[in-house]
Image: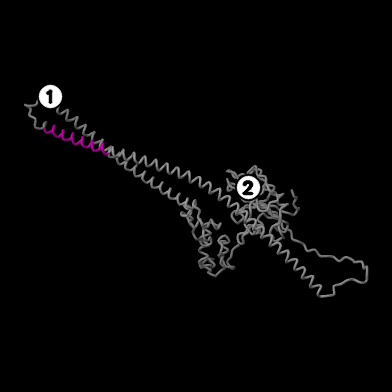
Amino acid sequence: MGSLKPDTSVAVFFMEGNSVSRQMLFSEFEAFLDGYVGLSDMADREAKAVYVVVNAQLQVEALVFFLIYFDDEGRADPEWNIPIERLASIAGGGPDMGGGAIRLSCRSQCSINWHQKELWDPDMTPGSSHFAAIKKAVDQNRLGFKKVKVEEVVPTLQPVEVISEEIPTITAAVGVSELASGADEAEHRLKLARLIKNQRLRIKTLESHREAQKEEFQRQSTLQSQGYKSKINNLELSIEKLKVINEQLQEKLFNRNEQFLGLQDKVSNQSTYLSDLEEKLKHAEVAEIEGLEKQKLEAELVILKEQLDRRDIESVYREEKQELLHAELEELKVAAAEAERESMMTKLKKLEVVFVAYHAGAGHVTVPFTDIYRYVENPLKYAASKCYVTEEVYRKWLDYQDSPVCCYKSASGDICGESIELVGNPGDFEVGSSDRCKRHKTG
């Protein structure tokens, strides 16, 4: 493991999108590794972090882009053992971040091959570069690194022993110009070599990022394909089951209707018989009917009335049962229609139908099939996530880019309204700064 200079500072930055979301000293990071504390907002996530080495003039000397997993309680993976200090000391050359070419370790440029998969590649795209975000965070110096000013060294004259009276001197102006031209050419070559090296590194990171995206896409496609196949099978089984239940309910409903019609016929016959008995009882003469027969008829009349009342109650109950069966049948029809709709969405997925939407600042956004419902629910929030900003910031940027003027409001409620330069990328837009003129800009 390489040793650090006495005046060197070390930190760990956590990246969220293309910006620094959290900063800590390396000693604090070691406390997280020991499990003394955890990060609740990092629970069950694999974080992208950067090991940063800074010299006494707050210039970046080395960067290691590494991955680390946090469990459900926000504690760092106890088996994490990437030698980031060693990787920083033996890393290859990287871009110039103000103090000359830095030492850089990432997935595309790793000195220890078996740790390559545990690193990640930075984004080197102009306007959203991770290097620019890290340099900005180092310049802000929120961790309070001590900055040592470089003292100018004044050369002292030393006595020179005269060996010969003839001292060679440059007498021709051509010789001086040739030396200056040679120095300029060497400096130009050095700049060109650094530029070529940076471009090669960017190409390697882009290729590595493309391969990682390809592998992840293939893995996700395989998982989604398996999931959709399983879902299709389940839906087909559900549809068949619903069809069987529907047929059974139809048959059951038909039988109930037949029973109900039969019951109505029986009630009608009983009512007719009851009317006949009442008529006989009414017109029966005391001389023709014995007292016992009259009592028997009255008792039979009471029994028939009770039977008729029970028949009426059963009729009401059967009507309620029939209504419940109708409602259950309608619910099954709705469920079957929903299953058929899900089956149609699955067919669209199998046909690889692509959904594309245009949003200002984000351009043409390709919406994956799995994000269709989330996009329909809130298109602006979805577009904001593609620009790595919040929905509120994205809405303010939309209002601002329609009319790029200073929106500062005075105490009296008057708006400044002075024309300002347009920030085309929502990720670079800062509320209270990008939408203000130089006179009213905050911070």
- From the image, tell me which residue sits under label 2: 68
Q: Does any portion of residue 197 appear in the rendered image?
A: yes
* Left or right, residue 252 beside residue 143: left
* Residue at left offset 64%, top offset 58%: 203
Front-most of 248 and 347?
Answer: 347
Q: Secondary structure at mark 1?
A: helix
Question: Would residue 171 be counted in the magenta stretch?
Answer: no
267 relative to 430, above or below: above
Dominant secondary-structure state across the stretch colored magenta: helix
Q: Secondary structure at mark 2?
A: strand
Q: Quadrant of residue 267?
A: top left
Q: How is the image coloured?
A: one colour
| Count of marks overlaid on the render | 2
Q: Report the side of 72 relative to 332 (left or right).
A: right
Q: Characterize the local packing of mark 1: few (<14), some (14-19) or many (20 or more) Cα atoms within 10 angstroms.
A: few
Type of amino acid under label 1: Leu
The answer to whether residue 58 shows anywhere in this view is no
Residue 342 location (% of width, % of height): 43, 48
> For this rendering, which residue is in front, 248 or 99?
248
Spatial distance from mark 2 to mark 1, Cα to Cα?
102 Å
266 in the magenta segment? yes
Q: Are marks 2 and 1 in contact (CB under 8 Å)?
A: no
- Location of residue 128 in the rendering, given as x and y in whole percent from the top left corner: 60, 59
Q: Is residue 405 above or below residue 272?
A: below
Badge 2 or badge 1: first in the primary sequence: 2
Dot 1 corresponds to which residue? Answer: 292
Q: Quadrant of the C terminus?
A: bottom right
| Residue 293 rendering spot, x and y as whole percentages | 12, 25
Please state which amino acid type lies under the numbered disc 2: Ile
Magenta range: 257-279
